[in-house]
Structure formats: structure tokens, C-alpha cells
Image: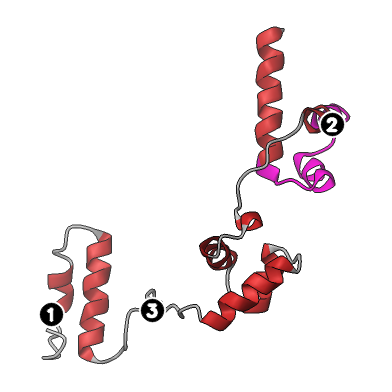
Amino acid sequence: MGKEHDSTHISTIMKFPTADAQYAALMHFWKMYGLIERPPAARKYEKVTLEEKIKAFNLHHAGKNLTEISNELNRVKSSTARILEEMKCERASRKHKPLSKEEICRIRLMRLSGASLRDIAEKMGRTHSTIKYQVDRLNLVSHSNG
């Protein structure tokens, strides 16, 4: 239909069962019509070069963190982490570091003194979600015991 410049495409596209299928058909129509090269949501990813892998490895062993390496390579963190994991760099994994008993006590005291979750997270160098999870657990424990 797109190659023939058919204007009745909308009624045909609306027959598709889902919005995603309709969108895909519309993008395909406009691509065939010649108005777009490819759908705007589609991306092309650059392959990681050997030089980038070497640079990431060297930066990692120089003590740079994931954010710094990502900025240096001009890549997103998940892509950089994948590069480092592929190269078997131990510190590259983004696994959760459990809270120590001292940290849990500190969270409890800070929360009881009125500190917000965000303030606690910043002071302890932890994510907001980790602090929220622990505060929720502390609330459950105090409710079940009292």
C-alpha cells in the first residue's frame, strides 16, 4: 500500500488487534511510502571496539568506578558493566552489598530522630530503595513485636 501511495491505509491499519501492531503497521507504511528511513524508536548500536575494551580494562584497574569509565567511553553504565563482566573484572558486578548490623542500627536511629529516607541514603552512601526496604522491615518487626 505504501509503495502505491494508497490513502486508505488507516482503515486497514485500524483492523490490527493491538495498538502495538497498529503502530508497527503505520511505521511500516510510512517507511514504504518513503517519508521515513526507519521507525523513530529503532536504534542502531555501535559495536564495542577492542580499543574500548582495553581502555575500560585499564581504567577499571586504575581504580575508576563504573560511572567514570562510562563517561570516559561515552557509553551507558549497563553497556560498560557488560564490557567489564565480559573481561572478568571482579568489581564490575553491580551486586547488592548487604547492610551490616551497624548500618541497620544507624538507619533506625536516624529514622527515629526524624531524618528522611533520602537524607539517610545520602549520609550512608546507599540507594534510597535500600534504605526504604530496611525501614519497612524495621516497621514490620516493631509491629509484630508490639
Tally of numbered discs: 3
Residue drawn 67% across the image and 64% down it: 66
**First of labels 1, 2 by sequence position:** 1
Along the horizontal axis of the image, is 75 left or right of 63? Answer: left
Residue type highlighted by circle 3: Pro
Mark 1 and mark 2: Cα distance apart in space: 67 Å
Main SS class of the magenta portion in the image: helix
How crowded pointer 1 is (Cα within 10 Å; few <14, some 14-19, many 20+) is rated as few
Q: Residue at x 14, y 90 (%)?
A: 3
* Residue 21 screen position, x and y as percent: 22, 64
The disc label shown at residue 40, or none: 3
Mark 1, residue position: 8
> Label 2 amino acid?
Arg
Amino acid type, mark 1:
Thr
The residue where tag 2 is placed is: 106
Is residue 139 part of the magenta span, yes or no? no
Callout 2: helix, strand or loop? helix
Dot 1 and dot 2 residues touching (CB under 8 Å): no
In the image, residue 66 above or below residue 119: below
Please tell me whether residue 122 belongs to the stretch shown in magenta: yes
